[in-house]
Amino acid sequence: MSPSDPTILSVARAVHGHPLQPLLDLDPDLGQLLDDERLEAARRELTVRVTALPVGEWDGSRLAATDPENVGLLVLDGVMAREVVVGDTVSTELLGPGDIVRPWQLTADTELLHVSVRWNVLGKMRMGVLDRRAAAMLGQYPEVNAVLIDRLSERAQRLAVGQAISQLHRVDVRLVSMLWHLAERWGRVTGEGVVVPLALSHRVLGQLVGARRPTVSTALAQLARENRVQRRRDGTWLLLGAPVGVDVEPAEVVRQRRRLMPAAALGLELVPDAPAAAESPTSPPARGEVIEMRESLRMLREDAHNRGRVLRELCDQSAALRERTEAVRASVAAARARRAAS
């Protein structure tokens, strides 16, 4: 009896208490490698249960489908933030339609580095449960499995791009690069520019690019003055101009060293390394450090300018208050003089 037998499907419905829905109707792109005949068969046989998640914090370990033997959960619609907490720092990854998540894991938590993971649903979500029954059916359709694996590869590529963005020197460049990166997936073109329909706060953007919220707010204000990024009334973001690119001279990009293990571990002869020029106390700072120092100096100057403007406004208010006080005193003195004369 095959997994697609109607008897097995009816038993599955009775056991789980949820109606099964065609997977390829929920996510048509999964069938892009199937020919017409197999596409129709897959539409009939590949079915999954669908679970809905409300907005807010989500504890994936309490989901009924939480079982390490299940393949995972396929995001059908909505947006979720996966937050990795290390110390007092939070790194955020945004997940959306097409992503596969496993809120459970086979191995135990790491003991050498304390890391915690939080899940936060940012928009009402629906997920398809790829359980053991669905996995057995997927075994008959390697074309669909290939697309699922490609989805995992795309997610890994997005994470790599996000990591590269978080290492750019200037925070404003990180922010505008990340917003264009998000626009690749969620953006839509309008007459004004490219809209990223995600109501991301300054705090979340900081968690995406590796920066603190006050620094993000300052950088976004500068980008708004330059008419490159605008926040819309509904909290979403509007990108103006052309997509950004970071120009780097080829000589500055150093390839990863081929040998990552110590020479002794590989049975190689140890050769003392030549002293690095960068370690010399008299060597000039690297170009990246100069850029970072200039950016810090620019932000300090801007902060000093803002503080000076606030101080001038306070002085003007103090002078106006002093004038009003003198006028009141003069009026009181005149009234006393008139009463004394009468």
Image (cartoon, rainbow, N blue to C red):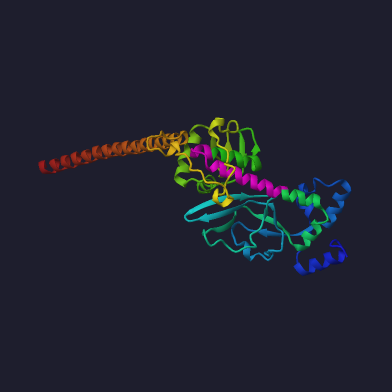
Q: Is residue 247 visible?
A: no
Q: Is residue 341 visible?
A: yes
Direction left: furthest residue: 341
Identify the residue shown where x is 58% and y is 33%: 245
Q: Position of residue 243 (x, y in %)?
A: 60, 33
Compare residues 203 and 294 and report the one nearer the observer.
Answer: 294
Identify the residue shown where x is 68% and y is 46%: 154
Magenta stretch, main secondary structure class? helix
Residue 331 sits in quarter: top left
Task: Name the quadrant of the C terminus.
Answer: top left
The answer to whether residue 70 is above or below residue 260 is below
Q: How many marks?
A: 0
Compare residues 297 and 292 and report the one nearer the observer.
Answer: 292
Q: Based on the picture, tell me whether residue 166 belongs to the magenta stretch.
A: yes
Q: Position of residue 139 (x, y in %)?
A: 80, 57
- Extent of the magenta region: 150-174
Compare residues 158 and 276 and report the one nearer the observer.
Answer: 276
Q: Position of residue 20 (x, y in %)?
A: 78, 61
Q: Position of residue 74 (x, y in %)?
A: 70, 55
Left or right: 342, with 142 as reference point:
left
Task: Name the quadrant of the N terminus.
Answer: bottom right
Residue 327 sits in quarter: top left
Direction front: furthest residue: 269
Identify the residue shown where x is 21% and y is 39%: 326
Q: Based on the picture, tell me whether residue 329 belongs to the magenta stretch.
A: no
